Amino acid sequence: MASSLRKDKIADALRELHHALINTQDYSEFPHILTSVINTLIPVDWMGLYTFGLPQNSYNVATNPGLPFDWNEKYIEVMEHDPVREKSLRQPVGGACIFSPKDFYSSEEAVYCYETSKKYTDTTQFLTLHCARTPAIDSGIAFYRTDEKFAFEESDRQTLEYLSPFLVSLSHTMMLHAEFDLKRAALETVCKSSKDLYLCLDGALNIIDLPQETEAFLRRCFKHSAWRILPEDILIWLKSAVAPRGAIPPGAGPWTTVCVLPDLELTMTAHAVVTEQQRTVLVLLLKPHDRKEDFAVLAKDGLSPREQEVLSYLPLGYSNLQIAQAMNIAEVTVKKHLKNASRKLGACGRTETLFNAMRRKSLLESASVF
C-alpha cells in the first residue's frame, strides 16, 4: 500500500463510515455516504452498488444521488456485454480490479457497451470490488472517475482490497435493507396476508424480489426452469398493458389478467407501488383458483359468447368489478351481460342465474350424449 495512505487514516475513514451508516435508516443514502468517505482515501466521482440475480439476467443498481441520469434504468442497455461486470465477478469475493478504456476494445460487444455508456456519462476509469456471491445473487461495487488523465493506480486497488471486509459487510446490509423495503411495500400496500403469492419487478420488468413460496408455485404451474425471467406470455402482457413505454406509470393501475393453465386459472394483478425509499416498483399479486366453468353449451339457449364468459366467473365468487378487470371491459358492460343472461335463463338475481346456468348446462350436455 502507498505510504501516503497510512493505516490510521483508513481506520479514521472506517469509523466515520460506521458512524454515518448507523445513524441513517435510508439505505438509498448508503452510496452517497460511502462515496463521500471513500473520497478521503481514493478520490472518485461517483459509485454504483450492483446486485445481479443468478443466473445473471436481473439486476439492481444503487448509485449516489445527484447524477444527471438514472443508471439503474440505463444499465439494461449494456449489461449483457459489460466486460467490467464479467471480469469483476470472476474475481474472488473481496477481490478488486482496475479498468480503463483500452479494456473495452477486446470485442465488438465491449466497444458497443463503452460507446453506449458514454451517451450518459463521461466515465473513463473504473475500480471495482466483488462483494458477495450466494446461490441466488452476485454483487459488486464500482467506483468511477471521469478524468482520462486521472487513472486508478495499483495503490488504489490495494486500498480497496484492504477495505473489502467492511465493504462486503456493507453490501450485504444494503441488500437486506432493499429486500425489506420491497417486502414491506408489497405486504402493506397490496397483499392482504403474508401468505399471498407475489413478486416485485423494477421499471425494466426485471424480477427484484421473488419469495421462495412464489418461485415454487410458479415452477409447478409453468414448468419454467429460470425463474429470474418471466414466461413470454406474462412479459407480453406486462409490456403491452402495464409498461407500454418501458416504464411503470406512477399512480396508474392496477392491471388484471387471467392466465388459463391445464389444472387451474391464475389471476395476476399488477400494482404500481412507491416504496418508503420513493422507488416505484411493480408488485405482481398471484391468485390461483379452480378453472372457470365452461358455459359454451348455453349458446343453444341464445347466450352470446360474452354472456357465457361473464357467467363462467360466477362460480369463482368474482364481483362485477373483478370480472370487468379480468375481461378488460367496463363494469357497466358486465352488468349488462349478466342481466341479459339472467333474462334468457329465466332467473332473477345472481345466485338463481348461476343455479339455472349449471342446471341447463347439465341437461344440454346429457342430451347431447344420447
Image: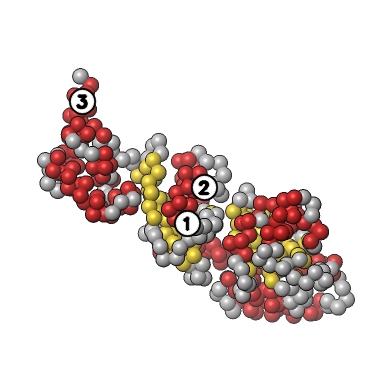
**Percent from the top left, x then y, of residue 280?**
49, 65
Give the spatial CA distance, label 2 vs label 1. Answer: 15 Å
Crowdedness near tag 3: few (<14), some (14–19) or many (≥20) residues, C-alpha within 10 Å: few
Residue 11 shows in the view: no
Mark positioned earlier in the residue sequence (3 or 2): 2
Q: Is mark 2 on a helix, strand or loop?
A: loop
Whole-angstrom CA distance, mark 1 to mark 3, is 46 Å
x and y percent of residue 326 in the render?
A: 33, 49
- Taking the image as shown, residue 306 lies to the left or right of residue 43, namely left
Disc 1 packing (10 Å; few <14; some 14–19; many ≥20): some
Left or right: where 195 falls relative to 82: left
Q: Name the residue under label 3.
A: 366
Q: Mark 2 points at which residue?
A: 230
Q: Is residue 240 above or below residue 148?
A: above
What residue is rendered at 26% in x and 45% in y? 310
Circles 3, 2 touching at the beta carbon (< 8 Å): no
Q: Within 10 angstroms of label 2, few (less than 14), some, or many (20 or more) residues?
A: some
In-image side of 298 versus 247 (left or right): left
Rendered image quadrant of residue 206: bottom right
Tag 1: amino acid: Ala
Q: Residue 134 carries which label?
A: none
The amino acid type of the residue labelled 2 equals: Leu
**Relative image position of residue 297 (x, y in whole percent):** 24, 32
Q: Residue at x 39, y 40 (%)?
A: 260
Left or right: 148 in relation to 180: right
Q: Residue at x 66, y 66 (%)?
A: 120
Residue holding disc 1: 243
Q: Residue at x 56, y 66 (%)?
A: 177
Instruction: Identify the amino acid type marked 3.
Output: Ser
In three-dimensional space, the C-alpha distance between marks 3 and 2, rounded to whole angstroms, equals 42 Å
